[in-house]
Image (tube, helix red, strand yellow):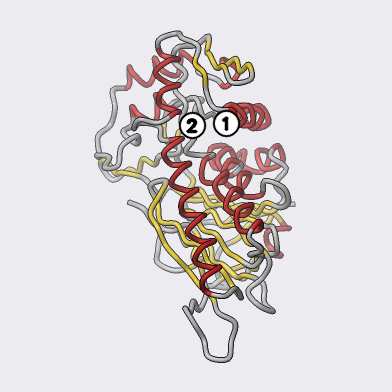
């Protein structure tokens, strides 16, 4: 099941008499719906900019697909065979960056657990409500694949652990956001909102107003809260309602805890705000360790990822959030239960 984690609360018009135009185009890539919205640019230039962004999204999708033929899946095949593989400079740089984020998160962000993700059935377009063999889970956890198992020498990659299976699903969308921002800026398009399945990056503003987005309520239609995004800010949400299945009334989501090999329990959603250079990338990668850390450890995980504005919704629907995040949000229901942590 796939739903937007962030709602775009905009009046999107293809043209408006006497007003600056706003253009939007949607597509389906990275296994989710993507939207690019451009404000205040004449139609031909806006359409060309959006087309270039969509082309880039497809290129990255083809490059990083974890289970269909791609450069990443070819690398996984080589790792499983104990071979060293030549990769593109771009992929090598991504892996080095992902390794740094893994270290910063103390292993909660771990792109090497593709074997676990596959075993739980999430490396497919149409996953089924079937629990995996617990013995397989235990064996994969015991092998303990880590980004530190990789040796990256310029464009040569190899692993001392054949059980490393790379899945950059928690990295690619954020990387794509930053690439989209670069492409649009190079074309002089400075007021835009880019949404990839709930990871949203804002450039400039919506005319005289900041871009305003809403955070999806994890258990019912509509927004839990809204916020204004400033130039260069991104918001990222990880939720148990985006890709999941249920067995005997229990929900199993695609976010796997690498420490025990099981889908995270006790958390409905996490939302963070990131700023500055690589804001898009960080909105994607940094939300994962905060989610995996759970109700007891989310604040510490956010600190490790240098995130000041964060919230977590626990299994009971209680919203736990930082004081900085509280200042940014306008809750749809003023009676929403909240626990503000300094």
Res. 219 image quadrant: bottom left
Q: Residue at x 46, y 51 (%)?
A: 55
In this view, the residue in front, 160 or 239, is 160
Query: Up-down: is 199 above or below 97?
Result: below
- The spot of residue 310 in percent (x, y) is 64, 52
The residue beneath circle 1 is 108
> Mark 1 and mark 2: span between their CA atoms?
7 Å
Q: Residue at x 67, y 77 (%)?
A: 209
The residue beneath circle 2 is 257
Q: Are marks 1 and 2 in contact (CB under 8 Å)?
A: yes
Instruction: Say if residue 320 shows up in the picture.
Output: no
Q: Residue at x 55, y 50 (%)?
A: 270
**Among all residues in the image, which is located at the extreme front?**
44
- The spot of residue 160 in percent (x, y) is 53, 9
In this view, the residue in front, 95 or 163, is 95
- The spot of residue 102 in percent (x, y) is 62, 29
**Among all residues in the image, which is located at the extreme bottom?**
18
In this view, the residue in front, 222 or 179, is 179
Instruction: Say if residue 131 shows up in the picture.
Output: yes
In this view, the residue in front, 32 or 255, is 32
Res. 252 image quadrant: top left
């Amino acid at each position: 099941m796939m739903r937007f984690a962030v709602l775009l609360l905009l009046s999107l018009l293809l043209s408006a008499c006497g007003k600056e135009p706003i253009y939007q185009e949607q597509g389906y890539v990275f296994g989710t719906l993507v939207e690019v919205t451009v404000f205040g640019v004449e139609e031909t230039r806006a359409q060309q900019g959006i087309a270039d962004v969509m082309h880039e999204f497809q290129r990255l999708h083809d490059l990083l697909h974890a289970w269909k033929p791609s450069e990443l899946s070819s690398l996984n095949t080589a790792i499983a065979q104990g071979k060293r593989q030549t990769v593109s400079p771009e992929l090598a740089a991504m892996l080095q960056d992902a390794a740094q984020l893994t270290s910063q998160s103390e292993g909660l962000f771990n792109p090497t657990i593709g074997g676990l993700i596959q075993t739980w059935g999430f490396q497919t377009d149409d996953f089924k409500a079937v629990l995996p063999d617990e013995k397989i889970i235990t064996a994969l956890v015991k092998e303990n694949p880590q980004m530190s198992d990789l040796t990256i020498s310029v464009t040569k990659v190899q692993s001392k652990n054949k059980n490393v299976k790379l899945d950059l699903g928690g990295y690619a969308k954020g990387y794509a956001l930053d690439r989209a921002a670069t492409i649009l800026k190079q074309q002089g398009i400075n007021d835009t909102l880019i949404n990839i399945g709930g990871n949203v990056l804002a450039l400039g503003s919506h005319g005289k107003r900041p871009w305003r987005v809403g955070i999806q309520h994890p258990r019912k239609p509509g927004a839990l809260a809204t916020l204004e995004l400033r130039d260069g800010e991104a918001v990222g949400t990880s939720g148990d309602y985006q890709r999941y299945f249920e067995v005997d009334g229990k929900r199993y989501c695609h976010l796997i805890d690498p420490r025990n090999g099981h889908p995270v329990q006790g958390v409905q959603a996490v939302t963070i705000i990131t700023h500055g250079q690589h804001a898009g990338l960080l909105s994607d990668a940094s939300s994962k360790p905060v989610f995996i850390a759970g109700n007891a450890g989310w604040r510490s995980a956010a600190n490790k990822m240098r995130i000041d504005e964060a919230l977590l919704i626990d299994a009971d629907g209680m919203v736990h959030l930082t004081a900085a995040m509280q200042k940014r949000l306008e809750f749809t229901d003023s009676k929403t239960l909240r626990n503000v942590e300094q």
